[in-house]
């Protein structure tokens, strides 16, 4: 399982008393790190669940619609309780995208499903 820690251990240790309390990124860089580690690797990273991240960015932490899913863990690290690990590979725009490496493969314009992607990958490595 990939490490999703946002903060260095010494800083997270100072936040251990915040378990279950709401989390909100303190700046854009921290927000980008959180989005990259959680949102972009989540099965729910599309509407309507994407509203979790949108609301976190635009609402005050004490707003009634601020996402309850964004909290601190017992280790003092931010987390999203709605997070569900997405598959490593996904298909978009007629290409196979690899979440692990950030690369994408094209070359078969009729790729529209994960099954098409598997067939393409198997043929590319010689396993028909």
Image: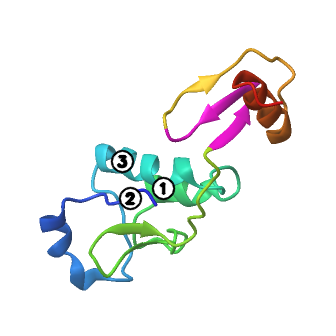
Q: Is residue 4 left or right of residue 117?
A: left
The residue identified by callout 1 is 38
Q: Which SS class for mark 3?
A: helix
Q: Residue 91 magenta-drawn?
A: yes
115 on left or right of 73: right
Q: Please state the total of marks drawn on the protein image.
A: 3
CA neighbours of label 3 inside 10 A, class few (<14), some (14 to 19), many (20+): some
Q: For the residues marked 3 and 2, what is the alpha-carbon distance in whole angstroms? A: 9 Å
| Residue tagged 2 | 4
Quadrant of residue 86 in the image?
Answer: bottom right
Q: Position of residue 127 (x, y in %)?
A: 77, 31
At horizontal 56% and vertical 61% (from top left) the residue drawn is 52
The answer to which of marks 2 and 1 sits earlier in the sequence is 2
Looking at the rendered image, the disc whose residue lies closer to the viewer, 2 or 1, is 2
Q: How many C-alpha atoms fall within 10 Å of the one at disc 1: few (<14), some, or many (≥20)?
A: many
Label whose residue precedes the other's in the sequence (3 or 2): 2
Which residue: 46% across, 59% down? 56
| Circle nearer the N terminus (3, 1) | 3
Question: Which segment did they paint magenta?
Answer: 89-100
Disc assigned to residue 33: 3
Q: Residue at x 70, y 52 (%)?
A: 47
Q: Position of residue 33 (x, y in %)?
A: 36, 47
The dot on residue 126 is: none
Label 2, label 1: how far apart the Cα atoms are: 7 Å
Whole-percent x and y of residue 39? 52, 52
Nearest the viewer among 60 and 117 is 117
Determine whether 55 is above or below 107 in the image: below
Nearer-the-camera pick, 72 or 61: 72
């Amino acid at each position: 399982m990939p490490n999703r820690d946002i903060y260095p251990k010494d800083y997270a240790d100072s936040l251990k008393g915040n378990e279950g309390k709401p989390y909100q990124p303190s700046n854009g860089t921290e927000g980008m790190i959180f989005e990259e580690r959680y949102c972009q690797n989540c099965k729910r990273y599309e509407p309507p669940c994407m509203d979790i991240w949108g609301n976190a960015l635009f609402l005050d932490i004490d707003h009634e619609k601020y996402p309850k899913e964004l909290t601190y863990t017992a280790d003092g690290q931010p987390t999203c309780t709605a997070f569900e690990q997405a598959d490593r590979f996904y298909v978009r725009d007629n290409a196979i995208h690899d979440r692990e490496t950030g690369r994408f493969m094209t070359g078969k314009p009729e790729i529209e499903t994960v099954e098409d992607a598997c067939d393409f990958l198997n043929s590319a490595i010689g396993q028909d």
